Image (spheres, rainbow, N blue to C red):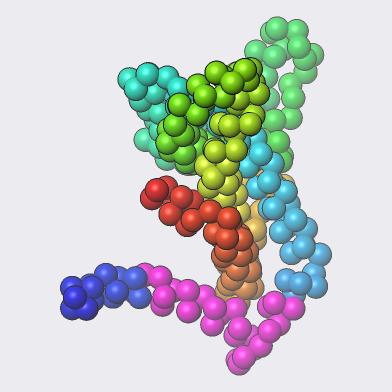
Amino acid sequence: MLVLMLPAILVVFTLLVVPMGWLFWQSLYAEGGFSLEHYRRIFSEGIYWNTFALTFRISFIVTLLALLMGYPVAYAASILPQRWAMLVLALVILPFWTSVLVRAYAWLILLQRSGVVNQTLMASGITDAPLPLVHNELGTIIATVHILLPFMVLPLYATMQKIPYDLMQAGASLGGSPLHVFLRVFLPLSMSGVLAGMTLVFVLCLGFYITPELMGGGRTVMASMLVSRNIQLYSDWGAASAVSVVLLVCVLAIFYVVGRLISLEKILGAK
């Protein structure tokens, strides 16, 4: 059995363990030897605090908006006939056929001052002048929600599909209104899907790079962009590695906390 597992172990070791070990070593290496200087800078300099605060704030807002938009879609798909549910899911998954870079550029074109959104708002008389929808935090959030929405819908649908419809009928037969049955029966049973979807969206948003780089116009600096700039502008691999390690620890902490509430298989969609 061990012999059969050796290729997989070798691949994991080569592509995961070695790079992560190198990353950790780089974060502890400065001025020719072992040093915690990079971590001291991260926890003492304002630019790092502000960047992490912005990253977590955007991730929280994106996660909340994705939940508010994704829950009704997943709920509708779970109660529709099978063929209509598959159509809804196909529309949700369809953007995966387009790269993140292309989708980010598409939102940049749609939301720019002369884009379709601003032109429509002005033509309808809602606004008198173009709204600043790109090169700021708002544009970053709009594009990121669209890109990460499927990661919210799919875990929700997988959970909702397994909720026995008989429970809803039983609640209604006992005199419960549709809203009461939904709040007291369906919603609690779907919470594992809610936590799984929120975890996936939040964690993925923490490491987003292309979308905030394009939509933020260099003004909305998230942690991944800080890693890139430390390498490209300053060739500071140690600082970039330290930021990456801090992000990794945050992600592992989130998975640990959520894993205490629901199983890891549900987060990853295996159950």
Q: Nearer the viewer, residue 215 or 7?
A: 7
The location of residue 258, given as percent across then percent down, is 58, 56
* Residue plotted at (71% across, 59% down): 52
Residue 211 visible, this orientation? no
Q: Main secondary structure of the magenta part?
A: helix
Find residue 225 and report its image quarter: bottom right
Where is 55 relative to 24, above or below? Answer: above
The location of residue 26, given as percent across then percent down, is 55, 80
Q: Nearer the viewer, residue 212 or 179?
A: 179
The location of residue 32, given as percent across then percent down, is 60, 91
Indicate the quadrant containing the N terminus: top left, top right, bottom left or bottom right.
Answer: bottom left
Where is 209 relative to 111, above or below? Answer: below
Residue 40 visible, this orientation? yes
Is 240 part of what is drawn in magenta? no
Q: Residue furthest front?
A: 174
The location of residue 106, given as percent across then percent down, is 52, 30
* Residue plotted at (47% across, 74% down): 20
Question: How many labels, in total?
Answer: 0
- The segment highlighted magenta reads 15-40
Is 37 part of what is drawn in magenta? yes
Find residue 131 and report its image quarter: top right
* Residue plotted at (65% across, 35% down): 65
